[in-house]
Amino acid sequence: MIFDAHMMIEKMALRKEKMKNFWIVACICSIVILIGVVAFAGVSYMESQKTIDVFQELAKEWDTMLQVEELEIQMETTGEQAEMLESRAEAIGEQVGVLESRTEATEEQVGVLESQEEGEVRLVFGGDVYLSDTFLGAYDVKGVSGILDQEVLGLMTGADAAMVNQEFAFSERGTAMEDKQYTFRVPPNRVKIFQEMGIDIVSLANNHALDFGTVALEDSFDTLDNAGILYVGAGRNLARAKEMQTFHVNGKVIGVLAASRVVPVAEWNVGSSSTGMLTTYSPEILCRTIEENRAVCDYLVVFVHWGVELNEYPEDYQFQMGKQYIDAGADLVVGCHPHIMQGIEYYQGKPIVYSLGNYIFNLRYASTGLLQILIREDGEIVAELIPVRTDALPFRLLQGEEKKEFYRHIESISFQISIDEYGIIRYNKK
C-alpha cells in the first residue's frame, strides 16, 4: 500500500513538473510570438513607410512627366501657332503686295487725274448700262460698292462730268413692245444708284429706251430731271431731242449731243411735237445740229448708238459718219451698241472711239474700257483708256498682264494708234 502511495506521489510530482514545464514553454513561446509580432509590426511599419516613400517618389516623377508632356504640348502648340502666324504673316505680306501693286496700278491708271491742274477738265465715258436684277441685288446687299469697287467708283465720282448710255427706261408703266426679244425698264427710285455712281449725263438715244412706249420714256425724262442728271438724244419733241447739254467747268464749256442709228421701228423717231429719240440713219440732222452748237462750246462730244452687235470691227457707215461728225465740228465721237469694244481711230487729230462695249449690263464679257479725256488749260487733249474687269462683281480695274493684254487687243483692232503702259492713246501719223 505504502509502495502504491509512493508511486502515486511520484506520478503526481512528475505531472506537476510537466505542467510547470508546459506553462514555462507556453510562456516562452508567447514571449517569442509577441516579440515576433512586435518585430513583424515594426518591419511592416518600416516597409509601409518605405512603400509610402516610393509612391511619393513615383507621384513626383509622374507629376514631372506630366509637366514635361504639358511643356512639350505647349511647345508643339506654340510651334503650330508660330507656323500659323508665319502663314498669316506671309498671307498678309501677299495682301500687302497686292495692295501695293494695286496702288501702283491705280497711280498709273489715274496718273492723268493726279496731274490735273487748275483750269483743266476731266471727262469720263462708259458704255451700255442696264441695271438688271444682278446689279440691283448686289446694290441691295452692299450698296454701290457691290457693283463697282472703290477705284472704279472713284474714277466716276471724281470726274468733272461722267456719261454713260442708259439702255432702259426708268419707269414702272407702259407695255412691253411686242415681238421684241429683250425689253428693259427699271423702277424710278433706282435712279439713286446713278447718283451714287457719279453719273452726270446719259444718252437716251438707243434701241431700248422706248421698250415700254412713250409713257415709260417720259417717266425717264422726269426721273432724271428730278435726280439732277442730264439727258441727251431724246425728248418730248424734236427741239428737246436735238438740244445740246452743257457743263461749265474751269472756264470751259463742254457740250454733249447724242443720236441713234439703231431703232426697231420708225415710230421711235422723235417728231416735231411727239416724244421719241433723235436718229442718225442719215447724218444731215445731227451734223447740222453740231454745226449750230460748235460756236457756243469749247469742246463738243457726240455720243452715237451704232454698229452691229458682237462685231468688233466698225461698219463702213461708222467710218463715214464718224468723220462727218468731226468735219461738222465734233471734238470727240464715242460709240456704243455692239456690247463689245471696237477700235479707235484719229481723224483730223480727233479721236473716234467706235464702241466702248458694255459697261454695267451683264457679266457675260470679261472686260471693257472707260474713256477718260483730260482737256488741258492750253487746249491740249489727252485721251486715256482705262480697262475694267466686268465678268465678276464688283467691277475692278484690270492689272498687270491682263491690262497689257487688253491694250494689245485694242491696238490690234484699231487704226494707227498705240496705247502706252498708262493707257494714254497716241495717234501714230504715217
Image: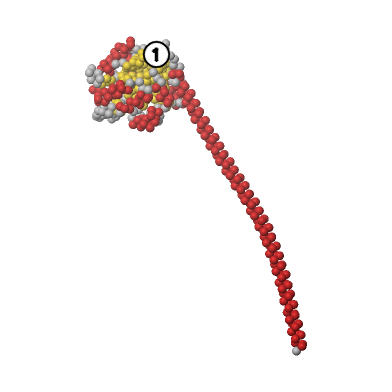
Q: Give percent across and percent down for residue 100.
A: 49, 26
The structure residue drawn at horizontal position 43% and vertical position 14%, both measured from the top left corner, is: 118
Nearer to the camera, 251 or 233: 251
Image point 41% across, 22% down: which residue? 155
Q: Secondary structure at mark 1?
A: loop
Q: From the viewer's perspective, is residue 176 above or below residue 261?
A: below
Left or right: residue 188 compared with residue 372: left
Horizontal side of residue 419 vs 317, given as left or right? right
Q: Nearer the viewer, residue 378 or 57?
A: 57
Q: How is the structure coloured here? A: secondary structure
Which residue shows up at 57% across the image and 42% down it? 74
Q: Which residue is mark 1?
A: 250
The residue under the point 32% across, 24% down is: 166
The residue sitting at the bottom extreme is: 1
Q: Is residue 186 above or below residue 77?
A: above
Quadrant for residue 200, please give it. Answer: top left
State whether residue 262 is above or below residue 299.
below
Look at the image and tell me in which quarter the C terminus lies.
Answer: top left
Whole-percent x, y for residue 187 in the image:
30, 28
Q: How many marks?
A: 1
x and y percent of residue 307 in the render? 32, 22
User: Callout 1: few (<14), some (14-19), or many (20+) C-alpha neighbours within 10 Å?
Assistant: few
Residue 105 placed where, x, y %? 47, 24
Mark yes or no: residue 227 visible: yes
